[in-house]
Amino acid sequence: MSIRFLLFYIGLTCLLACGKEKGMTPEPTPADSVNDGILKVLFIGNSHTSYYDLPKTFKAIMASAAFPDSIQVAVSAPGGFSLEEHAKSNQTLDLLNGDNWDWVVLQENATLAALPQAAAEIQVYPFATQLQNRIKKNNSETKTMLYMTHAYQGGAPDCATIPNSCTYDWMQNEIRHNYLMMADRLGAKVAPAGMMWKILLSQKELDLWEVDTIHPSPTGAYISALTLFASMQEQRLGDVLFVPGFLAATDRDLIFKVINESIFDDNPNWKVY
C-alpha cells in the first residue's frame, strides 16, 4: 500500500509542479465573476472526496488537458460529513461565499445517499436544496455537480432496519436513484463515479476499495476524478491526460474506454445499468 501511494503522490506532485513552472497552474487572484479565465472549483463532501486527495488528482487531470490555463480548487470535506452538516457549517458556508465559483461539487454521505426515497426526502434532499440555494445566491452563474460516490464493498451497514441492504448492488442502485433525483430537483449535473466503478467491476476484478471496504483505493479515487473531469468538461478522456505511475497500461485503457463509452455513448447507459 505504501509503495502504491508513493508512486501516486510522486506522479501527481511532479505533474502539478511542472505545470506550474510552465504557467499552467499559477496561483489565482480573486475575481468579480466566473468568467475570469480561471476555473474555480469548490468540493463539498467528506472522506470520499478527500481520500487520496481526489481534488488534487482532478486538478492534475485538468492541468494535463491544458484547459483552462489556470485552475483553483478548494475543499471542505471533514470525515463523515453529510450535506445537512455542510448546510449548517460556518466553515463550509464561508468558503462557499468567499469566491465566485465556476463549479461547486456536492457529495453526500454514502450511507445517507443509499437511503430509501422516503427517508431521503427528509435526510438528504432538503439540505441539497439549501446548499444549492446558497450557491445560487452567492453567484447565479455557478454550476452544481453532484459527485455520485461508490457503494461500500459489502453494502449498506444497517441490515436490521433496511432489508436486503447488505449488498454492493443494492447500495449502489439506491445511491444512483437518489443522485438522479437530486439532479432533477436542483437542475444539476451528475458525475456518476460509483456507476463507473460498477461497470468496470463487471468487466475486470480491480482493486478499487481500501482494506476498510468503504473508502477508495488510489485506483478508485483516480477513476472518480476522471469521471468528474469527463462530466464537468463534457470531454472524452484522451491520451494526454495524467495517469498515475502505479496504474498498469491495460487497466488505464479499460478505465478510459468504460468512462468514454458509458458517459458519452450510453454503452452501457449508467442511468439504468
Image: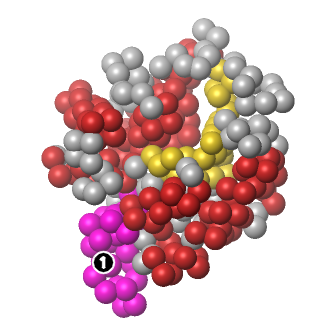
Mark 1: secondary structure: loop
Q: Is most of the magenta stretch helix, strand or loop? A: loop
Whether residue 19 is situated above or below residue 253 in the rendered picture: above
Outermost residue on the left side: it is 203
Q: Residue at x 65, y 63 (%)?
A: 129
Residue 9 shows up from this direction: no
Q: How many marks?
A: 1
Above or below residue 148? Residue 265 is: above
Residue at x 63%, y 52% (from the top left corner): 44
Residue 81: in magenta span: no
Magenta part of the chain:
150-175
87 up-or-down from 199: above or below: below
Q: Nearer the viewer, residue 239 or 132?
A: 132
Q: Is residue 173 magenta?
A: yes
Q: Is residue 195 placed above or below 124 in the rendered structure?
A: above
Residue 162, x across and y down, in percent:
37, 86
| Colour approach in the figure | secondary structure
Q: Which residue is mark 1?
A: 166
Residue 225 percent location from the top left of the image: 45, 40
- Counting from the top left corner in percent of width and height, residue 148 is at 45, 54
Tell me the residue at 24%/33% (across/down).
Answer: 257
Check disc 1 and give the amino acid type: Cys
